[in-house]
Amino acid sequence: MPLGIFIVLFVFIVSFITLIASVAFLMHPQDSRFATVKALTRATIYATVLGLFSGLVAPFKHCIVEAGNKDAVQMTGTFLQGMIESFVPVIIGFTLLSLSWVVVALGIQRKEHPRE
């Protein structure tokens, strides 16, 4: 199993935990839960950036290792495919993070304007 799947899975898990914490804040808007969401947001950003950079290393390494075995056109296609695949953790991480902060915004609205 390639290393990339573990990186994507790790980013997904950290992002999903952030989303769960955001839902917990929505249900019970407290300052401690908000602080937890902020800390998990940083963890999600770090995991996403780590996933991006570790994914970017693979196409460069592959091109160096396979430089003499393939022609330029095939090498370019392989390189571009690797570059595109390296952005999968970014898409997953920041999509779930955006969704988390929409939920947090609803929680802040609920905290400031409680139902009567």
Image (tube, grey):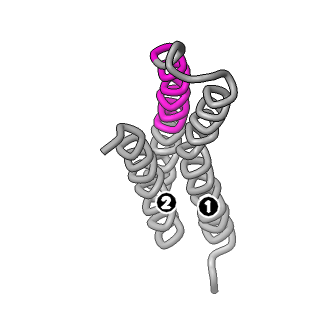
Which amino acid type is marked by label 2? Answer: Leu
Marks 2/1 in contact by CB < 8 Å: the verdict is yes
Q: Which of marks 1 and 2 precedes in the sequence?
A: 2
Q: Residue at the left extreme?
A: 1
Question: 20 and 56: which one is in front?
Answer: 56
Question: 32 and 20: which one is in front?
Answer: 20
Residue at image location 49% in from the left, 63% down from the top: 25
Q: Which residue is mark 2?
A: 19
Where's residue 30, x and y in %? Answer: 48, 59
Where's residue 41, x and y in %? Answer: 52, 44
Q: Local crowd at mark 1 within 10 Å, few (<14), some, or many (≥20)?
A: some
Give the secondary structure at mark 2. Answer: helix
Residue at image location 47% in from the left, 51% down from the top: 15
Where's residue 102, x and y in %? Answer: 66, 62
Question: 44 and 71: which one is in front?
Answer: 71
Question: 58 and 42: which one is in front?
Answer: 58
Q: Is residue 108 part of the magenta span, yes or no? A: no
Q: Which mark is residue 99?
A: 1
Q: Is residue 48 part of the magenta span, yes or no? A: yes
Give the secondary structure at mark 1. Answer: helix
Q: Residue at the bottom extreme?
A: 116
Which amino acid type is marked by label 1? Answer: Leu
Rendered-image quadrant of the C terminus: bottom right
Q: How many numbered marks, from 0 up? A: 2
Q: Local crowd at mark 2 within 10 Å, few (<14), some, or many (≥20)?
A: many
Q: Is residue 106 left or right of residue 67?
A: right
Q: Is residue 47 left or right of residue 49?
A: left
Per the picture, the main secondary structure of the magenta-coloured stretch is helix
Where's residue 57, x and y in %? Answer: 50, 22
Residue at image location 57% in from the left, 35% down from the top: 82
Q: Is residue 53 left or right of residue 36?
A: right
Q: Which residues are magenta?
A: 46-65
